[in-house]
Image (tube, rainbow, N blue to C red):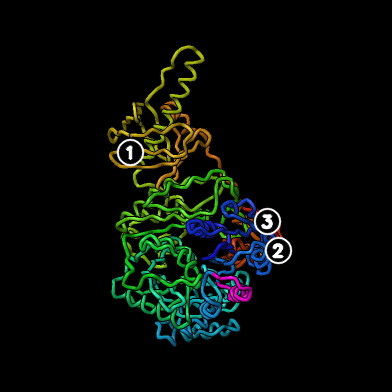
Amino acid sequence: MFKKILIANRGEIACRIMRTAREMGIKTVAVCSEADTRALHVEMADETVMIGPPVAAESYLNVANIMNAIKQTRADAVHPGYGFLSENASFAKALKKAGIAFIGPGPKAITVMGDKIESKKVAIKAGINTVPGDGGALSSADEAVKVARKIGYPVMLKASAGGGGKGMRIARNDAECRDGLKRASSEAETAFGDGRVFVEKYIEHPRHIEIQILADSAGNTVYLGERECSIQRRHQKVIEEAPSPFLDSDTRRAMGTQAVALAKAVGYTSAGTVEFIVDQDKNFYFLEMNTRLQVEHPVTEKITGLDLVEWMIRIAAGESLTFGQDDVQLNGWAMEARVYAENPLRNFMPSTGRLTAYRPPLEDESLRVDTGVCEGGEISIFYDPMIAKVISYGATRELARARMSVALDEFHIRGVQHNIGFLAALMGHPRFAEGRLSTDFIAEEYPDGFHAQDLMPDDPKLLICVAACVHRAYQERASMISGQIQGRQRVVADDWVVLMHGGKYDVSVTLRDGGYDLSLKSGSVAIQSDWKIGEALFQGDIEGRRFCIQVERVGIAYRLTHAGAEADALVMNARTAELQALMPVKVAPDTSKFLLSPMPGLLVSLSVGPGQEVKFGEELAVVEAMKMENVLRAEQDGVVAAVRAKAGESLTVDQVILEFE
């Protein structure tokens, strides 16, 4: 067994690998860029080597610097995690030449399966179901249109070396095909150094279901069930679960058998994932093979009881699998939600900054949190904006879903915008609860984007009651302080008016041992809670149901967050509420004459200049943030008055790029 493993990665996956290595008694080496010197994975490792500047191309993707780190620390194996060099055959070859074990498949499998064009050819030869398509790299926009017309719209333009949703565009006509080729190729060149793009038929309303495999060097290959990854946004997975609520045992067996056949066709070893798209009739087609550990691997670990990282290490060390296909059992249900630093209410624009507060939910047998950050850490513009992965487990899908909902309520993050509200809304969506999924789920359910009204609770009673309880506690403290100063106890009123989301609610609240008694127009409510002022989470029991609400003072209001909903509640007496209704409302400034950067990032290009007329929908600029290109388009017809930023400039949120007449 290895004595020391260098993890050629960062963030949550580096931390996750270190946990298993530590349990196996193996020392670990972290590598870090200048931006990550205080990162959590650096703190966890036994040794650390700084490998370059913040830009990934000069640090985490710099093979020479990582090879020097291996030599310096005398590590005898390298785990690449996912992303970065995890599917880089040249890196695997360099390690092999240096006598260092690569904890992953061999260079041949990485090369063939990492190239979507070549992998499709291998799949066809191995008898695997494949999506109709030309399969060849496109040389021009004209060729892309020609091939797309032959296949029939809609089509998917895909980067040959792509992954993680990068370098992918759906085209439904010639114009979208030309633009999609340009965007997919540019994005792929930036992310993978390979701008080749091919085109294939886009399957309408598909499910994205993948098969996890394990293979050793002795020729033993097994599949570990499937993962449903259909909840996606811009081809990036948001929520995953295992097993799939759609598959039956026969389809699962057929998909697993084909996944194993593909692995054997390329002499695959280690953990790997074969991805399929599945139509509404359970017809399945090979999508790609990821020759690495997947982000969503924890859900498979929860239902199989296997540690995939441990088996990757053991296989790389020459050990054989100690179980066969008949020994693989799928028990219970697991879900994973990816927590990102992004603002769902601003078209999911990435958010950067320091985590001024970070408190994940407590882990137990039904909950796991994989993260690479801690309070005080920074989310930078240089890397993927993932903050953490929340993994829930239950005997049934409904129990796993309910556990996830509670965990999201308990996840307290401040300092950056995040998508927890969006995740909670998905968990509570009736269609998700029923398991009626497809990769179009988010686009279909939120066709105009995700908005504040999508977070509104159907019944605001719980938020109203908690706002009143919190206010009552603050009043009680003020009364005690006043009483100490004046030598007597001041009487505190119990009757309040709660103003929230445009509504006005009368409520009376009284403190008692172990909680609060409340009276509303709809009746009496008793809340059990030991919440104290200063605690971020108001946890308690209402009508026999456990709940958790995040509480924060914002001026004179109480900001309450629960089940994805966020509400600012004002609690006051009746007379003050009457006066509050007379207060003028501040009008937001008019920014319609400006094109503002919706995120921090790099201004890749400008498509217009001063004096130029623009039409609605026309491309104005391209901003790259966290490895994704975002096209900014005109929201109305107009004329450019001035250009306020230059291509190649780093932008801040709401920085002016263009001014219109």
**Can see residue 487?**
yes
Reply yes or no: does residue 154 show up in magenta.
Answer: no
Give the number of the disc on residue 648.
2
Where, by quadrant of the figure, is residue 321 drawn? bottom left
The amino acid type found where label 2 is placed reads Gly
- Secondary structure type for disc 1: strand
Q: Residue at x 50, y 36 (%)?
A: 553
Counting from the top left corner in percent of width and height, residue 111 is at 55, 79
Give the number of the disc on residue 541.
1
Marked residue nearer the N-terminal end (2 or 3): 3
The amino acid type found where label 1 is placed reads Asp
- Label 3 crowd (10 A; few <14 / some 14-19 / many >=20): few
Counting from the top left corner in percent of width and height, residue 634 is at 59, 63
390 and 521: which is toward the camera: 390
Q: What segment is highlighted magenta in the picture?
A: 87-102
**Can see residue 235?**
no
> Measured along the vertical axis of the image, is residue 591 above or below residue 513?
below
Kindly give the residue lying farthest to the top in the view shown. Answer: 487
Reply yes or no: does residue 96 show up in magenta.
Answer: yes
Give the number of the disc on residue 34.
3
Where, by quadrant of the figure, is residue 410 drawn? top left
Please give left or right for residue 282 compared with residue 95 in the image. Answer: left
Q: Nearer the viewer, mark 3 or mark 1?
A: 3
Marked residue nearer the N-terminal end (3 or 1): 3
